[in-house]
Image (cartoon, rainbow, N blue to C red):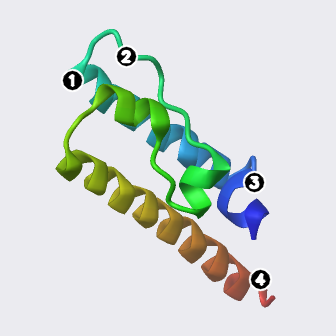
């Protein structure tokens, strides 16, 4: 499961890097001096808050929205893998 959601260099890891780049751009609209946002295994699998995101962006609404987006990316990755397995007959 870890490979599917996080470790796959050919798909899921690229999706999380793209997501982190988008979140970094969001954070920099709030605070131009903000550092890059990085997601960890805990953020992706266990919905742990993104620590450096919380440091720069205050407000429950934005934090809840980011958590919902993490869930949607995770759902998209799962859908990709399950449809790929069906297409391959696995």
Neighbor class of circle 2 (other Cα within 10 Å; few <14, some 14-19, many 20+) is some
Q: Secondary structure at mark 4?
A: helix
Across and down, in percent, residue 24 comes to 39, 29
The residue to which callout 2 is attached is 34
Q: Secondary structure at mark 2?
A: loop
At 55% across and 51% down in the image, what residue appears?
43
In the displayed structure, does residue 7 sit left or right of residue 47? right
**Counting residues from the N terminus, which is met first, the one under dot 1 or under dot 4?**
1
Q: In front: mark 3 or mark 4? A: 3
Across and down, in percent, residue 81 comes to 66, 73
Q: Are marks 1 and 4 in contact (CB under 8 Å)?
A: no
At 18% across and 51% down in the image, what residue appears?
61
Q: In front: mark 3 or mark 1? A: 1
Across and down, in percent, residue 22 comes to 38, 36
Query: Residue 88, labelled with which disc?
Result: 4
Q: Marks 3 and 4, Cα distance to the nearest angstrom?
A: 18 Å
Q: Are marks 1 and 2 in contact (CB under 8 Å)?
A: yes
Q: Marks 1 and 4, Cα distance to the nearest angstrom?
A: 45 Å
């Amino acid at each position: 499961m870890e490979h599917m959601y996080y470790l796959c260099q050919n798909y899921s890891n690229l999706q999380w890097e793209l997501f982190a780049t988008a979140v970094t751009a969001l954070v920099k609209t709030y605070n131009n001096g903000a550092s890059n946002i990085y997601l960890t295994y805990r953020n992706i699998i266990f919905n742990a808050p993104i620590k450096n995101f919380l440091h720069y962006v205050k407000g429950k609404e934005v934090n809840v929205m980011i958590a919902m987006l993490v869930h949607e990316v995770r759902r998209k990755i799962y859908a990709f893998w399950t449809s790929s397995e069906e297409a391959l007959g696995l």
